[in-house]
């Protein structure tokens, strides 16, 4: 659907929306590209690490630059209606509607904790050569918190080689995450990810919705005040 065909209210919602992509390896780059195609108002890119030859998707000329800065330039040049900006190194992000944390092989719990403090909705997206996992969505009042995930094993993928080239698994994970972002931003339907993750297996091609429950010994089970 292009912007001419999109209902005005939907278009307005998307244009008022700010989404953070935290983690800019090949998965985060694909995801940011997909979000730009949704014609969101603002996409903020965050990754303080530098572009090196291990990360595909960047230009050779960008080696040594902060990934967020190089990615904002690359993706911003292709964006027609979305402001693509980098989060300054070490700066706090505020005012985002959705914060997507991406990682290859593992998702650092401390990055998710920081995102959960900054933004009201956090979507973890983990990919590796063994498959991918999108979700669950972490809301301030959701029954699952970062510590639940940290104890569940969902933040670490099965070991395997690093995928450094555009790969169907990375494209699939980015597309699934972008579609969930679209559902959330549009706000017409309830997002599947609120209490579940979608898990894609590389070996079989199977994609499974998987319920994620609070950790039995996690403090969030008994905590009553808002986080
Ligand atoms: Zn918890």
Image: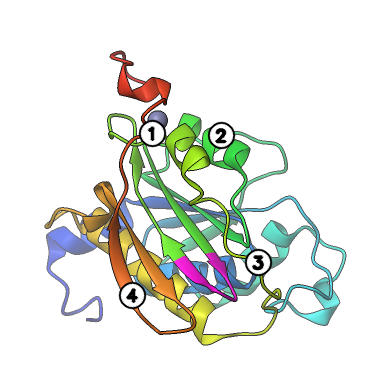
Identify the residue shown where x is 33% and y is 75%. Answer: 207
- 147 to 37, vertically: above or below: above
Task: Report helix, strand or loop for mark 3.
Answer: loop
Q: CA distance from mark 3 to mark 2?
A: 25 Å
Q: Earlier in the sequence, mark 1 or mark 4?
A: 4
The answer to whether the residue labelled 2 contacts the one labelled 4, judged by CB atoms less than 8 Å apart, is no
The answer to whether the residue labelled 1 contacts the one labelled 4, judged by CB atoms less than 8 Å apart, is no
Q: Which mark is residue 114?
A: 2
Model colouring: rainbow
Q: Earlier in the sequence, mark 3 or mark 2?
A: 2
Callout in the foreground (4, 3): 3
Q: CA distance from mark 1 to mark 2?
A: 20 Å
Q: Residue furthest right?
A: 64
Principal secondary structure, stretch drawn in magenta: strand
> Along the line of sight, which residue is nearer the eye, 142 or 178?
142
**Residue 127 falls in image quadrant:** bottom right
Q: Earlier in the sequence, mark 3 or mark 1?
A: 3
Q: CA distance from mark 3 to mark 1?
A: 24 Å
Q: CA distance from mark 2 to mark 4?
A: 29 Å
Q: Which mark is residue 207?
A: 4
- Where residue 114 appears, x then y in whole percent? 56, 34
Q: CA distance from mark 4 to mark 3?
A: 19 Å
Q: Earlier in the sequence, mark 4 or mark 3?
A: 3
- Where residue 185 appears, x then y in whole percent? 26, 55
Task: Report helix, strand or loop for mark 2.
Answer: helix
Q: Which residues are magenta?
A: 127-132
Is residue 113 left or right of 90 when viewed as pictured? left
Q: Does the magenta run of residues contain 130?
A: yes
Task: Report helix, strand or loop for mark 4.
Answer: strand
Q: Which residue is mark 3?
A: 159
Is residue 161 left or right of 218 when viewed as pictured? right
The local crowd at label 4, few if under 14, some if 14 to 19, many if 20 or more residues have their Cα within 10 Å, is some
């Amino acid at each position: 659907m292009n912007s001419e065909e999109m209902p005005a209210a939907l278009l307005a919602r998307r244009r008022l929306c700010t989404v953070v992509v935290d983690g800019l390896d090949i998965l985060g780059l694909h995801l940011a590209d997909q979000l730009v195609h949704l014609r969101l108002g603002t996409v903020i890119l965050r990754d303080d690490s530098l572009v090196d030859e291990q990360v595909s998707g960047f230009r050779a000329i960008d080696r040594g630059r902060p990934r967020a800065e190089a990615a904002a330039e690359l993706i911003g040049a292709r964006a027609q209606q979305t402001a693509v900006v980098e989060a300054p190194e070490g700066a706090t992000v505020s005012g985002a509607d959705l914060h997507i944390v991406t990682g290859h092989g593992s998702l650092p719990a401390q990055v998710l904790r920081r995102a959960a403090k900054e933004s009201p909705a956090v979507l973890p997206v983990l990919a590796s050569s063994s498959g991918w996992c999108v979700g669950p969505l972490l809301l301030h009042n959701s029954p699952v918190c970062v510590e639940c995930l940290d104890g569940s094993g969902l933040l670490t993928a099965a070991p395997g080689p690093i995928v450094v080239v555009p790969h169907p698994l990375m494209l699939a994970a980015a597309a699934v995450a972008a579609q969930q972002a679209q559902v959330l931003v549009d706000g017409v339907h309830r997002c599947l990810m609120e209490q579940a993750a979608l898990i894609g297996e590389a070996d079989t091609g199977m994609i499974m919705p998987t319920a994620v429950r609070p950790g039995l010994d996690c403090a969030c089970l008994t905590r009553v005040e808002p986080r």
